Image (cartoon, coloured by chain):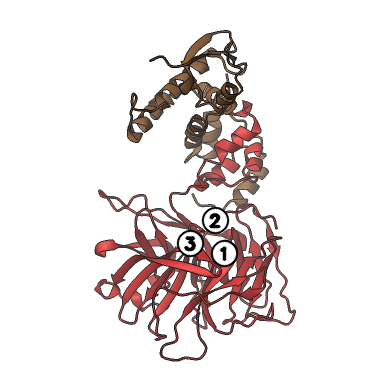
């Protein structure tokens, strides 16, 4: 039994052959398949090969059917390992998941970053993400006072 | 090298919206952009703990009550309260929550204040009648008119010329309307107590709605209402014989309500005599299947006072939790011995004042 394959082309010119059923987890690709413009491959100008490889890895894992059954618990564990990446790669994945419109990958990547923010002090957040503190001491104190009520 | 600052604003917003509300202060203090972004959308839509506001002894406090520690292996629970300094100068007499806004009424002849904690704005509300002085027994309702989201406060039923035609006991806001527990004015043996909704758009009370129990009007009975996730109501009914029942709505609209059983427990089996209290502020945690009921009087020791809450679960589970220890140095001007305690859950909103 042969399944329909389509070709995805990264921004740096590499080609990847992927099962259509796996690829259409991306709404963007699904629309293109519906509009029948995939014959010569799909150019993904915004996604470089290093990232596209990870996206395809994700989509293959999440293409769950009788041939590839997997429990939710196992998927969660796999997600954790999958997201053990450098920050820069995570942000590239967020951009790719957004561009390719893969909701579950987008949720996973955004939540991973949100979890990196959770529980940290402002200094720790700035240090983790290399963010400059553009508040003056007076401004920072005003913000702290305004949020004095907030649950911690 | 991609950094978070390289991402388009819309994507940073998506990330921040998944950060829990408990990190709000830290995120806002990180940088100006994040401070601004945090005010265009609500953080942490799924929350893991009870977040609300309490009034204790004329002061306003925010409260975080985390039940995550309750599981098969342990039962470590550590609620924390924080005194809200922005309203510290005046004694607060009553507090109401409606869709992310807090209506605070002060002792003495001062105008009430509406405060949006999430955005930080406050608006002073003028009393409708300049000669109207807020009395100890005044009852307030707080909700909004559907079309314009104009907030209206209702004071002692005089403001909007409405006659509820019944004896209103207590109320809670849900989805912009206020639901009250009320009794018929004419007391007769088989007359039932009921729930009634005030519609701020139509400026009138809705039909009488049934309660899942038959309270018979004895002084030793008590009924309190609470919000569940701003979607449903819960009602606590303490019978004269010390049995406490909690029900939760499966459907709640101004003219229709359906209830289901949540918990039933015999308070006389509890070691503490807290069921003697006049009112039982509470919240329920559906995931942990427990109710948390607050004692509305502090406990006193030589050096400090503290608050007590009881976590009550099915099958007789009971755990008492002490929190909010305050040293005994605040002057207590409670000449009338007014019961100054209330609790409300909090749902943030972006309403500008």
The picture's colour for chain B is: red
The disc label shown at residue B347, or none: 2
The picture's colour for chain A is: brown
- In 3D space, how far apart are the residues under numbered discs 1 and 3 (Cα atoms)? 15 Å
Q: Secondary structure at mark 1?
A: strand
Q: Position of residue A111 (x, y in %)?
A: 49, 35
Residue neighbourhood size for the residue with mark 2, other residues' Cα within 10 Å, grouped as few (<14), some (14–19), many (≥20): some
Vertical side of B261 occupied by B140: above or below: below
Q: Which residue is mark 3?
A: B232
Name the chain under label 1. Answer: B
- Residue that sits furthest to the right in the current view: B130
First reached walking from the N terminus: tag 3 or tag 2: 3
Q: Secondary structure at mark 3?
A: strand
First reached walking from the N terminus: tag 1 or tag 2: 1
Residue neighbourhood size for the residue with mark 1, other residues' Cα within 10 Å, grouped as few (<14), some (14–19), many (≥20): many
Query: Contact, CB < 8 Å: mark 1 with mark 2?
Result: yes
């Amino acid at each position: 039994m042969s399944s329909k394959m389509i070709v995805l082309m990264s921004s740096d010119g590499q080609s990847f052959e992927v099962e259509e059923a796996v690829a259409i987890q991306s709404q963007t690709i699904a629309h293109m398949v519906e509009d029948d413009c995939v014959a010569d491959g799909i150019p993904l100008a915004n996604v470089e090969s290093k990232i596209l490889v990870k996206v395809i890895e994700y989509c293959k894992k999440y293409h769950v059917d009788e041939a590839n059954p997997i429990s939710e618990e196992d998927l969660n564990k796999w997600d954790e390992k999958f997201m053990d990446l450098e920050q820069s790669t995570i942000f590239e994945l967020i951009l790719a998941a957004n561009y390719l419109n893969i909701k579950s990958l987008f949720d996973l990547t955004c939540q991973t970053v949100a979890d990196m923010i959770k529980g940290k002090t402002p200094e720790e957040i700035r240090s983790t993400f290399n963010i400059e503190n553009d508040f003056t001491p007076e401004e920072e104190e005003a913000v702290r006072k305004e949020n004095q009520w907030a649950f911690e | 090298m991609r950094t978070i600052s390289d991402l388009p604003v819309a994507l940073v917003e998506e990330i921040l919206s998944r950060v829990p509300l408990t990190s709000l202060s830290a995120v806002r203090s990180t940088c100006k952009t994040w401070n601004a972004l945090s005010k265009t959308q609500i953080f942490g839509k799924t929350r893991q703990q009870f977040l609300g506001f309490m009034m204790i002894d004329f002061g306003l406090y925010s409260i975080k009550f985390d039940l995550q520690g309750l599981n098969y292996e342990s039962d470590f629970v550590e609620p924390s309260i924080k005194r809200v300094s922005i309203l510290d100068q005046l004694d607060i007499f009553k507090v109401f929550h409606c869709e992310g806004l807090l209506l605070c009424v002060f002792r003495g002849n001062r105008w009430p204040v509406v405060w949006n904690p999430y955005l930080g704005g406050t608006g002073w509300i003028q009393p409708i009648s300049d000669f109207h002085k807020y009395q100890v027994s005044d009852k307030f309702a707080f909700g909004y008119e559907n079309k314009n989201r104009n907030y209206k406060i209702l004071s002692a039923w005089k403001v909007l010329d409405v006659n509820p035609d019944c004896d209103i006991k207590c109320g809670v806001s849900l989805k912009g309307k206020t639901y009250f527990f009320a009794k018929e004015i004419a007391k007769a043996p088989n007359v039932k107590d009921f729930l009634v909704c005030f519609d701020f758009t139509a400026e009138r009370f809705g039909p009488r709605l049934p309660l899942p129990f038959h309270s018979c009007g004895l002084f030793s009975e008590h009924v309190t209402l609470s919000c569940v996730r701003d979607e449903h109501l819960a009602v606590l009914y303490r019978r004269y014989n010390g049995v406490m029942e909690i029900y939760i709505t499966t459907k709640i609209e101004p003219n229709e309500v359906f209830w289901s059983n949540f918990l039933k427990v015999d308070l006389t089996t509890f070691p503490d005599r807290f069921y003697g209290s006049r009112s039982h502020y509470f919240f329920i945690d559906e995931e942990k299947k427990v109710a948390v009921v607050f004692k509305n009087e502090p406990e006193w020791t030589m050096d400090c006072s503290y608050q007590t809450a009881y976590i009550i679960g099915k099958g007789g589970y009971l755990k008492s939790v002490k929190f909010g220890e305050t040293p005994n140095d605040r002057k207590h001007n409670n000449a009338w011995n007014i019961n100054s305690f209330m609790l409300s859950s909090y749902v943030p909103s972006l309403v500008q004042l």
